Image (tube, rainbow, N blue to C red):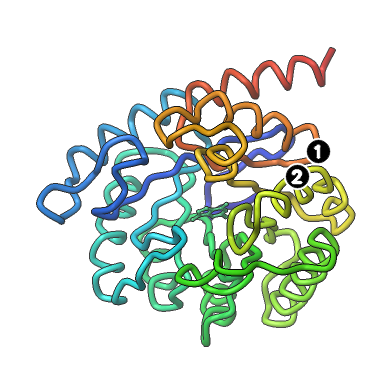
Amino acid sequence: MDCGGRVLDLSQPQVMAVLNVTPDSFSDGGSLTTAGLVNQQKVLQRVERILAEGAAIIDVGGESTRPGAKAVPLAEEMDRVLPVVEAINARFDAVISVDTSSPELMLAAARCGAGLLNDVRALERPGALAAAAQTGLPVCLMHMQGSPAMMQHNPNYQNVVSEVAKYLTARAEACVAAGIVAERIIIDPGFGFGKTVEHNLQLLKGLSQLQAMGFPILVGLSRKSLIGQVLGREVADRLAGSLALALMSLMHGAAIVRVHDVAETVDALTLFNAMQNA
Ligand code: 9MG
């Protein structure tokens, strides 16, 4: 997949590393901000490490999308994300993904060297479809029921797998109608976004049904509350659960796993690939 001039090899599963540049991201393995501002030195050290560990994509996010998270003003999101994208692009040969729903940031990030647009709102914000199409970059369309502030209040589905598939199909069609080529679309069922534990488990079990849509599947399960609720573990103790879920998702057709613990996940992927090639 062409990601703004850098190639993402999807002939085998790949790791997307989480790089949150938000002041409230302590649970992601150490804040990358100092006194509320992004610390570029810490960011570049982290990027150097996760690339050496084998990440194929760095997902830069300036807005927290955790349940209950408050919206961040656009100017603040842009101030956090753009210098980071620019600095990574100047120093490393990596596919840089930008985790945003803001059309203005999509356009500006593309100019700074971003190679992929990761939108948890599946380009539903006014202007987002047109902006993404204008960049020519691949897009990741994620399913979410509700909004981050309210999504865990009362998630409700008759059949979570078919409803997520129906939504993602409609969003992919909207992308193609807006001028985004189908080969540049990635889909994501949105684990934890407006879903109960049971919904998440049903989605994971039925993940392979989404393969019928013909798009690469990205999943984000790393450290999520599903692990906490099934195993009774705090965020800091969710590595084993994250690796188990990453492997289950690969076995059900995931092409990209979005994770915090890159080195450990790359080991798991390498074993998965070895089995596939045996
Ligand atoms: C930003 N973000 C947080 N969780 C995510 C997930 O599961 N998928 C994608 N695409 N982005 C996510």
In terms of depth relative to the viewer, which is nearer, 183 or 68?
A: 68
Residue depth check, mark 2 versus mark 1: number of the one nearer the observer = 2
In terms of depth relative to the viewer, which is nearer, 101 or 239?
A: 239
Give whichever of discs 2 and 1 has the lower sequence position.
2
Residue furthest to the top: 278
Residue furthest to the left: 35
Q: On the rendered image, what quadrant is the C terminus found in?
A: top right
In terms of depth relative to the viewer, which is nearer, 69 or 19?
A: 69
Whole-number angstrom distance, CA of label 2 to CA of label 1? 8 Å
**Category of crowding for the residue at label 2, using alpha-carbon neighbours closer than 10 angstroms: few (below 14), some (14–19), many (at least 20):** many
- Determine the residue positioned at 42% across, 65% down: 68
Q: Amino acid at mark 2?
A: Leu
Q: Secondary structure at mark 1?
A: loop
Mark 2 and 1 residues: CB-CB less than 8 Å, in contact?
A: yes
What label sits on residue 252 in the rendered view?
Answer: 1
Q: Amino acid at mark 1?
A: His
Q: Is residue 29 left or right of residue 58?
A: left
- Determine the residue positioned at 61% across, 59% down: 140
Position of residue 167 relative to residue 250, above or below, is below
Quadrant of the rendered structure where residue 77 is? bottom left
Q: How far from the left and from the top, in percent, is residue 262?
A: 48, 29
Residue picked out by circle 2: 204
| Residue at disc 1, CB closer than 8 Å to ligand 1 | no
Q: How far from the left and from the top, in percent, is residue 253?
A: 79, 40
